[in-house]
Image (cartoon, rainbow, N blue to C red):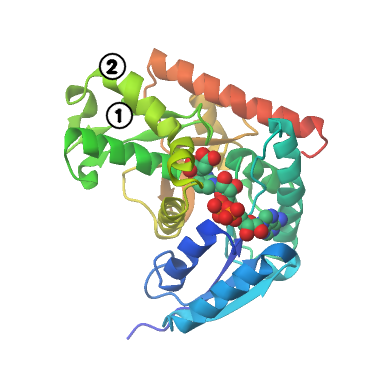
Amino acid sequence: MAAPREPVTVTITGAGGQIGYALLFRIASGEILGHDTPVRLRLLEIPQGLHAAEGTALELLDSAFPLLRSVEVTDVPSSAFDGTNVALLLGARPRSAGMERADLLEANAAIFAPQGEAINEHAASDVRVLVVGNPANTNALIAASHAPDVPTERFTAMTRLDHNRAIAQLALKIEVPVTAIDGVIVWGNHSATQYPDVSHATVDGRPVSELVDAEWLDEVFVPRVARRGAQIIEVRGASSAASAASAAIDHVYDWVNGTSEHWTSAGVTTGGTNADAATAYGVPEGLVCSLPVKSVGGEWVVATGLEISADARAHIDASVAELAEERDAVRALGLL
Ligand code: NAD
Ligand code: LMR
């Protein structure tokens, strides 16, 4: 019989929020790390969110999950990140009426800079960080830049929801199961400028371009995927939560357990070991950008050698320019 695995410590910020509620029970049931890995949960909230997180902690205990070793709720980042192996950063300030992008970036930098520092000081040496709170790419960049002792590749931003949305839209249109679709890429920022690219995608081995017309792709598919977040807010009256939690699980599960030869999409830092691959796709160093990635040996590695069409090039450049603008705005505030 195999020896029991050591518990893994998972920290969730903004744990009292909507995504937190959809995510925590799935982590506790073993969906994120595997059904053989015990888990210790740390729930970080701001003081106003503590009651909600404490209520969720009571329900987690009431669920009697066999893999759940402990649940701690705190508003102290140093305690929340102490020895953490996986950090899911959900807590962020949403944009409110009258707020400019720079105001949002400044408000969130005030969250992600100290959390980056706390991760740097207190997390386990193998820590992996997924930033979900928006603007996810730039928040991940801020956190990474405040954690100089953690390899930059360990900070990622979530674009898996966009990737999943793209697959689901193709499956619906072509009338195939989602599992038939392979090779989708989401490039750029987790924003309306992102580019869901199907030029390498296949359906049971056949190129997607043979099965759907170019007009539908340009005029329906791309804007639908890129603006799906706004559509959910409009229809549901709140931003996506369960689908975001599901995408976070997919991202961390693949990161920890590895992907096969098939790539997925993730926002990764374009420095460190990914610098050359990102530069080859025309993405400069010093950003967190969604790219085609495989998980190899517990690290995200950019899938290389993919041809980029002229049309894709223009879309990717626009999204990368937006990322650079966000970085410059944060830099101008002295936060990078
Ligand atoms: P929510 O408002 O329901 O919950 C956010 C929680 O974060 C709140 O409980 C709040 O108290 C907490 N919080 C705020 N500042 C904090 C801090 N400094 N430390 C710890 N906790 C803090 O929001 P939600 O629906 O759970 O969404 C969370 C974030 O995820 C939002 O920024 C949302 O825009 C983003 N999001 C991203 C994606 C993606 O694909 N990347 C998808 C959906 C939502
Ligand atoms: C989403 O993609 O659902 C979230 O990032 C919410 C948003 O603001 O689009």
Q: Is mark 2 on a helix, strand or loop?
A: helix
Q: Distance between the residues labelled 2 and 1?
A: 17 Å
- Whether residue 199 is visible, yes or no, is yes
Q: Looking at the rendered structure, which numbered label has been put on residue 63?
A: none
In this rendering, the count of numbered labels is 2
Q: In this view, does 57 lie above or below 127?
A: below
If you read the primary sequence from the N terminus, does the residue marked by circle 2 or circle 1 appear first? 1
Q: Which amino acid does label 2 sit on?
A: Glu
The C terminus sits in image quarter = top right
Look at mark 2 in the image and give the residue it sits on: 215
x 35%, y 82%: residue = 2
Q: From the top left corner, tell me how far across and down residue 99 is, in percent.
A: 71, 34
Determine the image quadrant of residue 220.
top left
Determine the image quadrant of residue 208.
top left
Q: Taking 142 as reference, is 173 left or right? A: left
Q: Residue furthest right?
A: 334
Q: Looking at the rendered structure, which numbered label has been put on residue 200?
A: 1
Q: Nearer the viewer, residue 312 or 285?
A: 312
- Whether residue 293 is visible, yes or no, is no
Q: From the top left corner, tell me how far across and down residue 333 is, in percent.
A: 81, 34
Q: Taking 172 as reference, is 78 left or right? A: right
